[in-house]
Amino acid sequence: MVDKINFVIAELNEKQLVELIKYHNQRYWSEGEPEISDERYDELIRALQAINPDHQLVTAVLAPQVAGSGKITHEKPMLSLDKAYSFEDVFEWAGKNCRSEDELYLIQPKYDGISANYQKGILATRGDGEQGENITDKLPLIELESTGYTGPVNQSVRGEIVIRDDDFRNLYSKIKRKGGGTYKNSRNAVAGIMGLKDITDMLRQHAKLTLVDYEMISFEVKYRALPDKWAKIAEEIEQLPYPMDGIVIKLKDEKYSESLGSTAHHPRGQIAFKFSGIRKESKLLKVDWSFGKNCLTPVAEIDPVDIGGITIRHASLHNAQNIIDKDIRIGDRVVVERAGDVIPYIVSALPGPAHTAAENNPMITKCPNCESELVRSGPELRCPNPECSETRLKRLTAAVKNIGIERLGEPNIRRMMATLGVMTLKDIFDLKLMDILQLEGFKSKSANNLFSEISTARTTTDFQVLAALNIPNIGPNVAKMILNEYTLAELRELPEEVMAEINGVGPERAGALRRELKEQSEFLDELLSALDVKQTKGEAAAATICFTGKMPEKRSYYEKIASEHGYEPVDHVNKELSLLVAMNPDANGGKLKKARSAGVKIMGLENWLQAVKNGNTTAQQPPEETEPEKPETSEPPADDLFSSSFSSEEPKPEKKASSSEIDDDGQIKFGF
């Protein structure tokens, strides 16, 4: 009898491999109680594939068993993905499929939940890729997170049903599963709940699931930039508040990707990089607390340990609550994991003899910079002192970015604070050109550029000011929706329960908004006194326009023309879109398909340009289509090696950001 857990791959024949795979499929997909890691399971699949590449267990698309109300046939198959286990594998795959070194790839999170598709009022699982289970009855438990929107599932979307990390931590410690006991992890919870025929008990316990739109978070990078950008992208993805087991890499050009075809198991135009999760033991020597944009972040210093050929000396502890939950102390033996060959973090502690000594508790009570008493904010520790130089530095950095001073990143603000005595946004606007020339690294041209950008940024919008407060989950998109209904002055007086009723806000955002508006009241006053702020409320919503297909000029060229004619350029197609302009309106790309199903007006590029030239198009009255379109032309190389890309209701910025951050709408801004 083969040991089902401690097996040796090299010693297994085909029959034994098949038996083990079937056993572990049952434990993972049907019972939700896996006995081996994903890496070990994938080793079994690769071993069987080497012996019999056409075996049905190799090509099968698997999914959890759920309680549904019948089968649903997908209009477009929802296949699985081929896998890569190292960056070298990823780069080799990308190299085989790129047509030039400027080929664009999208890099996205690989969520660890249940794949689902919502179309025409029906929610269905991926199933075998061709047919899935109708799980529409589970909708009362599910909240959709898409670009610029959080709320009931009400729009066509493909995504993953998961439990957010914060929801699992805050809600599921109290939610009892059928038969008693709590869920061990979020994936088990999702599978267990989706397997229920009756969700009444889950509704009573306020269980919450999230359907994450696959296209909500996406990085864009050229093939030749992959080696330089990969680690940083992976690091940003791993910080997202969702359960993930890897990263998806796919060709941006949908038409080219579809032309590559697919196997019975996976499309050839995309691949999944699986986190390897190599673990080693070490000793926790000390914990340093560094300043993040909203909190203090604990970083562990450990005895050097080799993981995957890299010497690890520091590891993430995530946040204060993580230290408390895992009861981690200085001097403990700790288990360190380098997930996805990128970020090392502390998985757990193995308490030693001095574990309970008070002096070994790594938690701090005072700010390491100004020595103010720290306060708890959810799982985080924060310094409440508005005059703390590090707190002020982070706030100023977020503020200048959100109001459009892209050339002024954290290092230069730190230099301004040290050299020029800058402490407020007003101080920045009061700078003279000669002041900027005093800063290290600035010469005439760069100083003039920054001075000009600062001057221009003095006039901004109220939603950019609200976003500049860096409130969790309140980025520019959500801020704009809020300020369409209330002015900033009204919002500051608004009760939390009324805030929660605003479209796209809800109780969680409302709580953070109410708290932060109070705590950052002085900083908000400072922003308002330094800026010329344009009010959003009462403005007529601009008609939106989206461009698709390979066009003769850069996309920004056409977006600028659209803006001059009163349109708001966006990247996403939904039923609210006013006009989709396509290089070839008869093509079958993803945006065109979405537009047709949503009843959005579609127009050819040349006809639209001609209408613009003739002066008979405005945002209020899109022109009529009159002429057939010419064939597509090739797309010229883009200027940026690397930029973030997601579906957004906001106009695309013309300038690149000088640093990276995850926006509080759930969008990612990434610039170098």
Image (cartoon, rainbow, N blue to C red):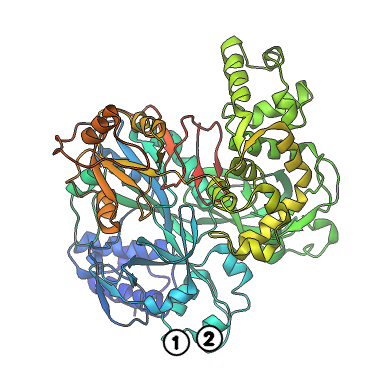
Q: Residue 424 occupies which quadrant of the picture?
A: top right
Q: Which mark is residue 201?
A: 2
Q: Tell me: residue 375, above or below residue 542.
A: below
| 36 with respect to 538 (left or right) | left
Q: Secondary structure at mark 2?
A: helix
Coordinates of residue 129 in the picture (x, y in percent): 26, 67
| 82 with respect to 161 (left or right) | left
Residue drawn 57% across the image and 44% down it: 536
Q: Tell me: residue 160, above or below residue 139.
A: above
Coordinates of residue 31 in the picture (x, y in percent): 41, 80
Q: Which residue is mark 1?
A: 198
Q: Residues within 10 Å of mark 2 (few under 14, many from 20)?
A: some
Residue drawn 70% across the image and 16% down it: 432
Residue drawn 32% across the image and 74% down it: 20
Instruction: Look at label 1 and name its amino acid.
Output: Asp
Mark 2 in CB contact with mark 1 (< 8 angstroms): yes
Coordinates of residue 1 in the picture (x, y in percent): 34, 80
Please state which of residues 230 and 601 is positioned toward the viewer in this rendering: 601
Q: Which mark is residue 484?
A: none
Q: Residues within 10 Å of mark 1 (few under 14, many from 20)?
A: few
- Marks 2 and 1, how far apart at CA: 8 Å
**Residue 348 visible in image:** no
